[in-house]
Image (cartoon, rainbow, N blue to C red):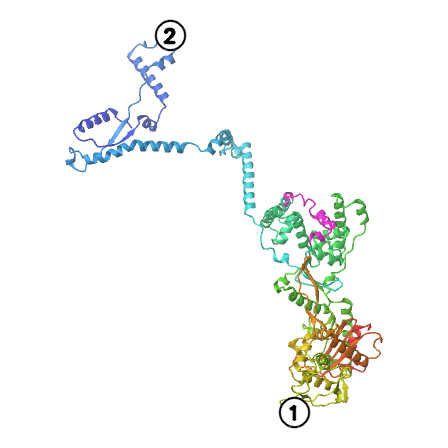
Amino acid sequence: MQLNVDALRRSERAAGEASEAAPQRPDETMQLKVDALRRRLPGRLRPADRHERDKRDERDQRQETGEPDELRDPHQPRERQEADEPQPQPHETMQLRVFRQKSAPDRKTVPDRKTDAARKPDAAQEPGRRADRRKARRSAAQPGPLARRTAPLLAVIAPYARKLKPVYPRRGRTGWRRWMPSWRQWIGLAFSGIGLTTLFLVVAYAATDIPENLNSYATQQDNVYFWSDGTPMARTGWVQRQAMPLKDIPQDVRWAVLAAENESFYSDPGISFKGITRALWRTVGKGDTEGGSTITQQYVKNVYLTQNQTVSRKFTEAMIALKLDNKMSKDKILEGYLNTSWFGRGTYGIQRASQAYYGKDVGQLNASEAAFLASLLKGAGLYDPTLGPTNHARAVKRWKWTLDRMVKIGKLSKDERAKYTTFPEPLKRNPLSDTGQQSDYLVELASQYAKDSAHLSDKDFDLGGYQIYTTFDRKREAQLTDVVTKARKKARESDPKTAKTAHYGAASVATDGRVVAVYGGPDHRKQGFNESNAATVPAGSAFQPFVYAAGLEHGVIKQRDAPRQQISPESVYNGDDGVPVSTPEGPYWDRSGRKVAAHNDDKKSYGPITLRKALAQSVNTPFMQLGMDTGLDKVKDTAVASGLLSSTMGPQVPALALGNARPSAIRMASGYSTFAAAGVHTEPYSVLRITRNGATVPVDRPLSGQAVGTRTAQQVDDALADAFRTAHPTAAPASARITGKAGTTEDDTAAWYVGTASKVTTAVVVYRMDLAKSLAPLPLKGIGTTAAGSVPYTIWEGAMTPLG
């Protein structure tokens, strides 16, 4: 493309002359540099190349015309002479002016002063604006402080970075080598991978939080119940776990576990890079899984995560373990691990494992036993020696290896290691699984009392971890259970049909309120309710001591408006059968309009009789009248103060004195124990103390107070001693202080015996009830008595032996 510059110049001059007569308007000029145009044309040359081309053209022209080359100085080098020659000047700028069409012809010759005046400020401001723009460009182009500091480093790195820049295919290579990175590029890729991986791990670590909510299954524990002597009685809960403070776990047990699982526990960062790499290789490369975890990682898995063997779970486990190791002490991590790990036989935690395999607490383990328990962490199903000979051989080998490791790391001396040459055989079965049938009733009583006295909700109690130390005496419980079992068996042999509906309830309560033994039923799985705590049948004549105590304590009123008169054990009442009951106003009439009369057993009459003797011989009529003279409200208050529940008391009618109340065996024993305790009643309780993972749980102490006066209690107790001696003169030594009384009901639906020996009161009740049909008591038909005597007394005597 050729541009005629001269033509353009002439056009420009003509335009200038034509515009002299007219006012000048600012025009927009598009300037095209000729050199720039030439650079854009095909075959563009650099300035040096153009100059060389021009010189060649000039020499060719001279040769054609024959012009001598005298202008060149022969004494001057040709290059210098050529340099001194005048250089061809580049063409001037070609200006293309674009004129805008005027809007009106009449404005050619008339200047617009207002417009000129308005444009002057803009013209004056234009240089300032350009200066501002130049400053802005300079300020934008100037590097910041950070860029100035890093500029020297970037200048050094830049050449190497350009060499590391991958260029594919590579120049100067052939074949497959063209597509392979150079060693520099390999190094760059390696360092880039390391950097990106490090950045990813840092971000992942910062983004990982330790979960606030622990794995509920991992923290759930069982509740353990102990006999009064401290030995385990039973456990409840979905899992067998009991947390123990680390201070209560011996050093040998701790280091046996560390030697077997993670000897560098106290020095590692919470994870094992070697173990993780091995586990990932086996998980990803070979398709199976293998553990490579530290104790911290295992604890995280037990408490926060699931047991799924996946790469994502493994990565999360490692991140949490790192963070947990920085926030929690090593001792706390070890404590948590020992209390949450699976040891087989349904047990979690070292404490429960110790009890399951050796029948003792973890504090009693030696290094040899600890080494075996540590081997179970590798897999209880593989190392429990009771599961087969292969397991036994494997367990012995692991046990020896663990002890040797303890010697190697300096936690067991060689002399002590030499003592452990025999494998510590564990128990054949878990003793905690054998709770027994009666213990279920004991646990029911103790758990309810524990929740009430410690103010624990069902939800908190079900989370477990509680150790409930009960008041139950193991020997008395076994003795009571055995004697009732024999009585049941004998009843089935004598009258199988009647014995099917027979029920036996018994309870032993100490004078200080402790429930030391109960018989709740034959099998808790078949009979859920507890016979010892059931209020089902009337007390009958066994209620007489409470009427007697009320009369002695409050006195009697025999006439209207007469003051109360004190009575004594020698006060005489009518003991005849069928004597009408009277009030201060006269005879007592029932709703049918008949006089109410009391009746003795077998309709026997005793004539005038003292109250003490009437109690000893269980005569009903004197006590029915005594109840009316004392006041039925006073009788009820005395019975409740002594231990009976107000909810089990019958209506306040004359029959109240004959025992229409329906107390449980526990409450009857508690009421009689009040008289043996000099009138001080203590609410029956079944729990001595409660702890949770070694920490004491506050428990409300049982209420106690003076139910009746000491003198009154002594008088009632003396009468009960007479009753025992009258009915069973040779049952106990004369020196022994034994009290007791039988109880029968008018319709023969229940038989009782309640007595005290050695500051323990036992109440026994026998009755019949067909639960499949109704809750109405049935006649005993000989179940309550035998040829040898009363069944309740036989049970009571067997449970209290030896008497005295």
From the image, which quarter does the C terminus lie in?
bottom right
Q: Give the foreground label among 1 and 2.
A: 1
Identify residue for label 1: 594
The residue nearer to you, when weighing 719 against 31, is 719
Mark pair 1, 2: CA separation: 172 Å
Magenta part of the chain: 245-274
Q: Quadrant of residue 110?
A: top left
Question: Residue 734 location in percent, x, y?
Answer: 85, 76
All told, the count of numbered labels is 2
For residue 773, say whether it is visible.
no
**Label 2 sits on what residue type?**
His
The residue nearer to you, when weighing 535 against 10, is 535
User: Can you say whether 418 is above or below 704 in the image?
Assistant: above
User: Can you say whether 187 is above or below 348 in the image?
Assistant: above
**Label 1 sits on what residue type?**
Arg
Cβ atoms at labels 1 and 2 below 8 Å apart = no
The residue nearer to you, when weighing 496 against 387, is 496
Identify residue for label 2: 75
